[in-house]
Amino acid sequence: MNQKNTQAFAADVVISGLGPTGLTLAHILGRRGHRVIVLEKEPVFYGNARAVYTDDECMRIFQSIGVAQEVATKMMPETPVQFVRKDGSVLGQYRPLKRVFGWPVVNFFYQPYLETQLTDLLARYPNVEVRRGRELIDFTQDEGGVIVTHQATREVRFGDATGARVNLDVDADAQRLRAKYLVGADGGRSPVRTRLGIEMTGRNFPEPWLVVDLKRRPGRDGLRHLPYFNFVVNPRLPVVSCVQPDGFHRFEFMLMPGMTKEWMEKPETVRQLLADYVDPDDFEIKRKLVYTFNALIVKEWRRGRVLLAGDAAHMTPQFMGQGASSGIRDAYNLGWKLSGVLDGLYGDEVLDSYGRERHGHAKAMIDVSVFMKDTVSMTNPIGTLLRDAVLHIVQTVPAFRRWAEEGGFKPQPAYARGQYLGLPRRGRSRPEGALAPQPEVRLIDGRRMLLDDVLGEGFALVGFKCDPREGLSAAQRDNLARLGTRFVTLYPYAGRPQGMKEVARSVDPALSEVEDLGGHMVDWFRKAGFKHEGVAILRPDRFAFGVVSPSQCSRAVDDLIRQLALQPQKAERQYA
């Protein structure tokens, strides 16, 4: 690193890239009052869908930044996902309806809508500045910050159907700014990752697919027979048929031996392929493009004051729809930690836990996406017979069918043992390092809301049928107050203590009392071994730091303060 630079800070954080990852991180940091500058190479959004799906975990993240209701209005929630034959007969379904994390598990969206909404909603934060048409070209870092050099973009993609690049005759106008941290959320070809020289490991897949994005013409009704998301497991030509809101639809066709990119992209070929499923005259073709995909992940997520997130850190095949979702999870994990470090609350070493935690889960999503790709694209006659037989068994055996319909194959939101910020996980059923459920709860005045809206944005202590503060010292309570901790007592539905003796118990505005309407968190406590009383220490991202008995809570809080390396004073925010 260079000598320490005394140049004034223009921002706390520079984010390179304004995709779903960068947008989510900008919201998290902006909401917490940090000065953020986002550099986006493209002057306008690409204008076509890439990602099409997100899950309940990410909707919960959107809830945490106050945008979930807005973005949900332009989504298709709880749409069944199917394996079907070419004639539409169903081999298997994925149709989860339980809302363990408070939101639908399946949500299809149109990416330009989502990105536009998230960008427009950034206007609520005067401390967040988006600079479009500016590309990062270099950076240097020292022990105190990062100097970022950026210029007007010289080559852009305007979002036409081919994705062609266009050279601009503009003055480069190179500028420099200094920030405390730089986050590269700048895509699979990440300039930030490239300049750091960080390698990625994994596989490149040579099998090309043709993607065709459609928009239904006004007055046409050509999608009634395709109400769900379908993997068409046709060994002669595997196809993906993807529903999207507002009359948008996507088909993906696997190129078979002898098919060339040039032939597949011809208008007459595209029309012929579409005609097997829809009337091509009912639609406007928004994009047609042959692509390949990768399954890669970085060896390092952080180097000094520079961190990677989203496709810059991992590339996921699209067959589970987890590429953008994994990036949103990156932003959530990194955001609260970065905010605490910037506020002078946590030690900088807390940021090392970001890559340790996210690596295993992101890799698991890559692996299951590759498995799904192999399942969908199978063309070997013997292999396809075996696959169809397995799907038939899963569909007909009740226990297997429930497992498939509820998504038992999807990696659970839990970090690898020994790699997370939290108490040790001492058994497979223990919840440490795993995402806690979010039930709908009933307040004492009868109002209903999702639990996270009660817990706020900081740490939380949730006592199952007990006051989680009992046994804590004054010093521990002071430290928890510095962390913005909220305290909640949770009861089963209709299980709140009652009777005249309760009148003597004084009302404490610092303690919220709620009832778990769906029983999701009650079951979670009981599966962890706490049938009568227990205390959950939840991180700001709602992963469990620990779940302990009331008598063990004091020691667990000491562990929390130690692992955060809680600093004695908050830093003041000063900008140029």
Image (tube, rainbow, N blue to C red):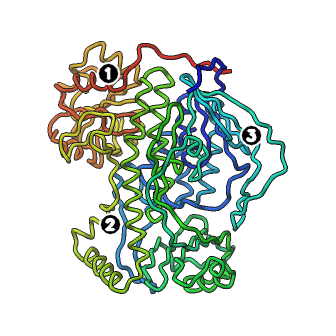
Q: Are marks 3 and 1 in contact (CB under 8 Å)?
A: no
Seen from the viewer's position, the closer of residues 64 and 328 is 328
In space, the residues marked 1 and 2 are separated at their CA atoms by 43 Å
- From the viewer's perspective, is residue 425 above or below residue 313? above
Please state the horizontal and vertical placement of residue 360, each as a whole percent of the image. 36, 48
Please state the horizontal and vertical placement of residue 144, each as a whole percent of the image. 56, 22
Please state the horizontal and vertical placement of residue 329, each as a whole percent of the image. 45, 46
Amino acid type at circle 1 is Asp
Q: Are marks 1 and 2 in contact (CB under 8 Å)?
A: no
Please state the horizontal and vertical placement of residue 250, each as a whole percent of the image. 57, 71
On the rendered structure, is 334 left or right of 394?
right
Question: Which label belongs to residue 405?
Answer: 2
Residue at x-position 59% and y-position 83% = 273
Residue position marked by numbered label 1 in the rendering: 508
Residue at x-position 57% and y-position 25% = 142
Residue position marked by numbered label 3 in the rendering: 151
Position of the C terminus, as image quadrant, is top right
Seen from the viewer's position, the closer of residues 438 and 267 is 267
Residue at x-position 41% and y-position 19% = 482
- From the viewer's perspective, is residue 482 above or below residue 83? above
